[in-house]
Amino acid sequence: MKSGGGAAEECDILVVGGGPAGSTAAALLAERGRDVVLLEKDSHPRFHIGESLLPRNTAIFDRLGLRDQVAAMGVHKPGAEFVSDATGQQVRYAFADGLDKVFTSSWQVPRAAFDDLLFRTAAARGTRVAEQTRVTEVRFGAPRAQVTALGADGAPRHFAPRYVLDASGRDTLLANRLGSKQANKRNTTAALFAHYHGVERRGGELEGFISIHLVEDGWFWLIPLPDDVMSVGFVGNQAAFKGHRGTPEQLFATRLAASPSVSARMRGAKAISGVTSTGNFSYAADSCWGEGYAMIGDSFAFIDPVFSSGVLLAMSAGEMGAEVADAWLNDPALGRARARRMERDLRHAMGRISWLIYRINTPALRHLFMAPSNKLRMRDGLVSLLAGNLRGSRDTMLPVLAFKGVYHLMSLALRLGLPVGAPPPRQAA
Ligand SMILES: Cc1cc2nc3c(=O)[nH]c(=O)nc-3n(C[C@H](O)[C@H](O)[C@H](O)COP(=O)(O)OP(=O)(O)OC[C@H]3O[C@@H](n4cnc5c(N)ncnc54)[C@H](O)[C@@H]3O)c2cc1C
């Protein structure tokens, strides 16, 4: 690749950002013989949040030939456990109970190693990769765009790709430039998180499960990682942070202490990282594509992480974005049709999971979650959603519709003050 103020380096596709979305797209395009450049502003391996994966992700690992490497670096995850501070209830959802009997478990991974693996895979398949190289400017034009990036030495580098895939994550490079990013007003939450040693891990049937502890104004995640590391995070709505001053460490300590179920597990815990905070984090761009480009993964949209859907959505978008770019290079009309389909599929998938996210703090959904009924296979349908079957299928349609119907009836009953049934007995951990 040429650098400095010289002639621009030509390529078929330039991918901005070497996270799960960008590395997946680059690997698949290079595999097809496309000339791909992948630019990453950071250096792998580097920390990233988003460590709990979903069973449906395994299909993409298989496509990339990475299932064994992911399994070797992670903690096996057979399901998700939900704990309610308000009622003391615990409920477990094993992925094996879902309607999908092909992918029945997943893993929880240190993202530094996971993202490094994906990035190296893209390079091994023939992508020209550069780290510590931040894209600063994208100008669209036919037949080639002009992309400027700054390398570690501060010198500009110029590229002339025929197609651009923006996989810049929450930096949302193109959506910011285009002014098309819209905050999601239905989900104005913020998060605090850190890594610990010595947090009580679940054993027995719950070994490897992610724990989601529901509190009044938000929820905690406890994600078991290798080497006795536990990723602990809190996601809360605006009320959860109102009136608090002090450092993220102080605020997190206050939140942890206020949850009886979490603080009980943290008694012997030692922080091994600082506390990170991130605010107002759900958004979407008006559209995920335009003439000569597409946005994939978090660069297009981000939804609340309560159901660990981010990496699956990002890698799925990486697959779709690769299809779109490849089609576009063959025939822009076909590329447009594929891009429209990608937009529809991504919005549909996010809509399915958002339905649950928007209602997670409502009494009716919490009641249904903590006391799942399997009439009409509602629980199994819910498990399929939690396992990442976000596209929907005939099998899941009826159970999911039934679940939503019961939710609406229960909301009405609660509004009218009618009895909705006693909470179920505690389950042993
Ligand atoms: C609090 C929180 C908890 C989460 N928990 C989970 C979870 O448990 N499970 C889950 O699946 N998901 C989780 N997520 C979501 C998950 O982190 C993301 O959805 C996922 O990482 C998206 O992948 P991506 O490739 O789109 O973006 P990223 O992983 O963010 O990758 C983008 C890459 O682009 C690079 N980049 C940015 N700008 C530029 C530029 N200008 N030039 C070059 N490079 C650039 C960045 O350095 C980065 O490496 C969580 C998110 C948050 C905020």
Image (cartoon, rainbow, N blue to C red):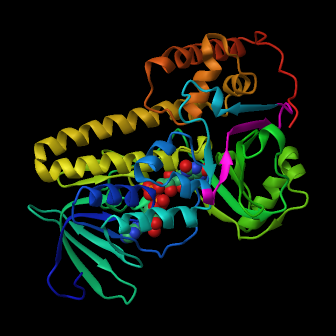
Location of residue 136 in the rendering, given as x and y in whole percent from the top left corner: 32, 73
Q: Nearer the viewer, residue 9 or 218?
A: 9
Give the answer, above or below, for where 133 lies relative to 387: below
Residue 79 is left or right of residue 117, and the answer is right
Magenta segment: 72-89
In this view of the protein, which residue sits in the foreground, 106 or 299? Answer: 106
Give the quarter of the figure containing the C terminus: top right
- Is 234 left, or right, of 336 in this rendering? right
Asked whether residue 383 is in view, the answer is yes
Q: Is residue 178 above or below residue 284?
A: below
In this rendering, the answer to whether 236 lies above or below 406 is below
State the residue at coordinates (57%, 62%): 111
Question: Does residue 154 lie above or below 195 as drawn?
Answer: below
Q: Is residue 80 magenta?
A: yes
- Write down the quadrant of residue 125 in the picture: bottom left
Identify the residue shown where x is 40% and y is 76%.
131
For the question of whether residue 109 can be seen, the reply is no
Identity of the residue drawn at 61% across and 15% down: 377
In the foreground, 369 or 100: 100
Pick whichever, 166 or 187, lies toward us: 166
Instruction: Give the side of residue 43 with respect to residue 30, left or right.
Output: right
The percent position of residue 257, horizontal first and vertical second, equals 86, 54
- Measured as percent of width and height from the top left, residue 108 is found at 64, 52
Q: Position of residue 266 (x, y in %)?
A: 86, 56
Q: Quadrant of residue 414?
A: top right
Name the image quarter holding the N terminus.
bottom left
The answer to whether residue 47 is magenta is no
